[in-house]
Image (cartoon, rainbow, N blue to C red):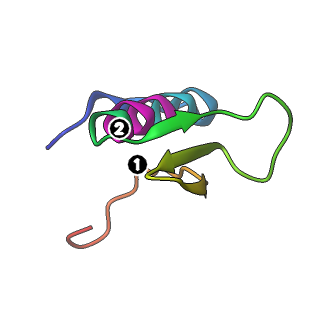
Amino acid sequence: MKLKGMYLLHPHIRGAWTEMYFTIRATEEGFLVTKPCRAAPYDLATDHRGRFRRVQVKSTICQRDNS
């Protein structure tokens, strides 16, 4: 599936789009998603059934083989 965000070439804009996309998908799957308000070593955090997880979101526009 081709996603519109794949064509955002500026890394900061692409990163912000990727975090928003992750937030939408995680929320659809029943996760609570939060973004730290201060500098943290992770981008987002999720809470699902009482389990808190830190999330570092990554994206790329490079395609290699079948990846």
Q: Which residue is mark 2?
A: 6
Q: Eyeballing the image, is 43 above or below 35? A: below
| Residue occupying image coordinates x 28% and y 34% | 28
Left or right of 46? Residue 63 is left
Magenta stretch: includes residue 7:
no
* Residue 24 magenta: yes
State the separation of the CA atoms marked 1 and 2.
6 Å
Work out whether residue 33 or residue 20 is closer to the camera in this orientation and state it.
33
Q: Are marks 1 and 2 in contact (CB under 8 Å)?
A: yes
Identify the residue under disc 1: 61
The kind of residue on which mark 2 rests is: Met
Q: Residue farthest to the left? A: 1
Q: Left or right? Give the position of 40 relative to 50.
A: right
Q: Quadrant of the N terminus?
A: top left
Q: Which residues are magenta?
A: 19-26
Q: Residue at x 27, y 67 (%)?
A: 67
Pinpoint residue 60: horizontal percent, then vertical percent.
Answer: 45, 51
Name the residue type under label 1: Ile
**Of helix, strand and loop, which one carries label 2?**
helix
Q: Residue at x 79, y 28 (%)?
A: 37
Percent position (x, y) of residue 57?
54, 50
Q: Mark 1, residues whose alpha carbon is within 10 Å: few (<14), some, or many (≥20)?
A: few
First reached walking from the N terminus: tag 1 or tag 2: 2
Residue lying at the far bottom of the rendered structure: 65
Looking at the rendering, which quadrant does residue 44 occupy?
A: top right
